[in-house]
DNA sequence: AGCGGCATGGTAACCGGTGTCAATCTGCGC
DNA sequence: GCGCAGATTGACACCGGTTACCATGCCGCT
């Protein structure tokens, strides 16, 4: 008989099945040293009662819980959601759950907030999303508090156990090489904000590609933005004012590419006839603007899934890659 | 002296402060029946040790935890993130944390998944986002499992304790009336998918506005999409093929509005000169396409915050509204 | 027969908090 | 000096699991 008010507990199961708590616990935890008749009997009672172990009690006894945290400060909704989906696909059918915690990178007490969060919730582990994943102090804090972490990023900046990385430098180099193959030689570049590792990597990829193509760098057709639409417009205006005008522009993310597109349109230029544009990230915006944007797709979900597996099952994780390659998605913004 | 391996516990605090566990517990819980000298002494020890109560133990003893869940099946990343931010702003500085769980509306065992999730995690409460918040069976399931819930939606479909609603009908009527004031009388409409309450409400708003303006409904300039960019294109093509062609189109969300814009552009029409377009939701896409989209802004964050407060502190919630009005955001897609 | 070893299952303590209820202390009226 | 109410604090059981360790039954072996 179950407790009158709540859910059945392990005691109820044990009593009805005529065994001890411990035996039920063994059944739940799939211990092998158990006679199969007993196991079946207990399983039948569990099914009949609809017994579900109380995760709080388990967490208390095991001194660890089954919550994994996602700490991020990412302006890109599409990407954050993609990561959430990826994590969820990794923890589906497990007892893990996903706790999210947006933080403010610019806040002076960001680290304190994270500390409070980690101390309070006692998470199993956390995932760190760029750009905040590039913050070494944060990783160190996790270490100090004994919370395992995995960082996602555009470059390998930690050991394999703590990092899932794409290779932005190579991806951008490929995208720019693609522009070169399409006949462009005057290719502008919109960089991401200083302090973002991804921004630096993407710029390196741009430089690599130009060097390979034997094209000299021209600061007049390089600008910096902070990954937002508005700064993309400003960067586009600067680049389009250069003489000679670039025939193609690579922007370090899609939002800024959309800004460049906006700037071009304002000046009466048509895309891709007068100007080719390539973005990065393949967010929803890339497909939904006109013309649809040729861009580089980060395999976000796959990376997030790999990262989550790394967190909850390091052994299994060794079968998955820690490095991912991005693909160029060809749409209509390049001539 | 704290345990050698882990964090200090209530026992450590009690021993060092020379009081009983229970007294420490009283300090933590701000019980009033406590001598202030004792309180200060205990607080000093807590601060010195950096003691943080173990939430799992608390959850076990209190038979409730401090996790609130967000169950959603929403294709709009911007909106989901907005909701997460809103919830977070409500639970900041509390011990609550936010657990997210995307589900698949179309999956036949969606309800089973949710049931498993709720039974396993034993959440304090859950928030239901549209479109899945419109599913009454889901609300009923929460009731049955004793999980309090709050639904967010475009219309009041539950009592005030369980609902935070906007008034889409009125908002759309206002937007369409605005088009009428701007001189449009042939106004097309792109509906959302059948089965979405929001879609039905928005259509009612459209009908209201036309009726008020004394304009007859013309099925030739009404189409249906499923809230995606692609179906927006199809709907746009249909509407623009009508004769006479509409001079303005209201689309039930921004993505479809972007699709209509795309369709117009493909046919060589310029926006807003040849065609005015109004969307709904004010997602990032609305501001980032060209021309920027005039649209209706759902006060997502405020609604989510109100909903979260309703969940964690019903008394406080009575001071907040349960109904929200949407604003028309005027940009450049209307002439 | 006596013994060790293995498979199986039970008992009790413990994880770190909270609720209940009783014990102690205080001040106050008489 | 006594009784009593109210304030303060503590002892102890309990939440629902897990682990450490012990008890039992059964087997084969010497």
Image (cartoon, coloured by chain):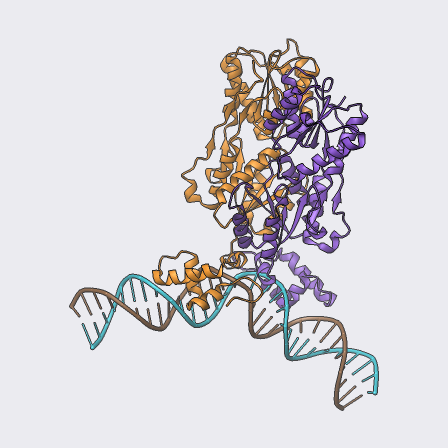
Chain colours: A purple, B orange, C brown, D cyan
Q: Is residue B253 in sight in this rendering?
A: no
Give whichever of B77, A119 is nearer the camera: A119
Give whichever of B101, A285 is nearer the camera: A285
In this view, the residue farthest toward the top is: B244
Rendering coords of residue A183 (x, y %) = 80, 23
Rendering coords of residue B156 (x, y %) = 50, 33
Rendering coords of residue B140 (x, y %) = 56, 43
Give whichever of A175, A42 is nearer the camera: A175
**Placement of B87 over or under A271, stated as above or below:** below
Q: Is residue B198 in sight in this rendering?
A: yes
Rendering coords of residue A28 (x, y %) = 67, 61
**Quick one: quadrant of the C terminus of chain A?**
top right
**Placement of B252 over or under A20, stated as above or below:** above
Is B107 left, or right, of B46 in this rendering? right
**Placement of A219 over or under A107, stated as above or below:** above
Which residue is at a point 57% across and 23% down the rendered structure image? B203
**Quick one: quadrant of the N terminus of chain A?**
bottom right
Q: Quadrant of residue A235?
A: top right
Give whichever of A188, A25 is nearer the camera: A188
């Amino acid at each position: 008989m179950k407790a009158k008010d709540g859910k059945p507990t392990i005691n109820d199961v044990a009593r009805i099945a005529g065994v001890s708590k411990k035996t039920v616990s063994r059944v739940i935890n799939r211990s092998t040293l158990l006679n199969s008749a007993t196991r079946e009997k207990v399983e039948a009672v569990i099914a009949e009662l609809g017994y579900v172990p109380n995760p709080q009690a388990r967490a208390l006894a095991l001194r660890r819980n089954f919550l994994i945290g996602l700490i991020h400060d990412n302006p890109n909704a599409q990407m954050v959601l993609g990561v959430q989906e990826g994590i969820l696909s990794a923890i589906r059918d497990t007892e893990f759950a996903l706790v999210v915690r947006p933080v403010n990178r610019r806040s002076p007490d960001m680290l304190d907030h994270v500390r409070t969060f980690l101390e309070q919730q006692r998470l199993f582990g956390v995932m760190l999303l760029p750009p905040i994943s590039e913050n070494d102090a944060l990783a160190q804090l996790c270490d100090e508090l004994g919370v395992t972490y995995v960082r996602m990023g555009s470059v390998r900046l930690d050991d394999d156990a703590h990092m899932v990385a794409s290779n932005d430098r190579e991806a951008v180099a490929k995208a720019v090489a693609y522009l070169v193959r399409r006949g462009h030689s005057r290719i502008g570049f919109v960089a991401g904000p200083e302090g973002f590792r991804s921004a630096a990597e993407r710029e390196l990829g741009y430089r690599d590609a130009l060097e390979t193509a034997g094209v000299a760098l021209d600061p007049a057709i390089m600008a910096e933005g902070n990954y937002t639409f508005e700064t993309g417009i400003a960067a586009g205006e600067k680049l389009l004012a250069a003489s000679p005008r670039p025939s193609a522009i690579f922007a370090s993310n899609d939002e800024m590419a959309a800004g460049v597109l906006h700037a071009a349109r304002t000046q009466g230029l048509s895309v891709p006839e007068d100007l080719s544009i390539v973005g990065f990230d393949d967010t929803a915006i890339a497909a939904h603007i006109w013309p649809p944007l040729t861009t580089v797709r980060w395999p976000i979900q796959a990376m997030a899934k790999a990262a989550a597996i790394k967190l909850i099952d390091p052994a299994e994780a060794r079968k998955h890659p820690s490095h991912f390659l991005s693909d160029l998605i060809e749409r209509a913004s390049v001539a």
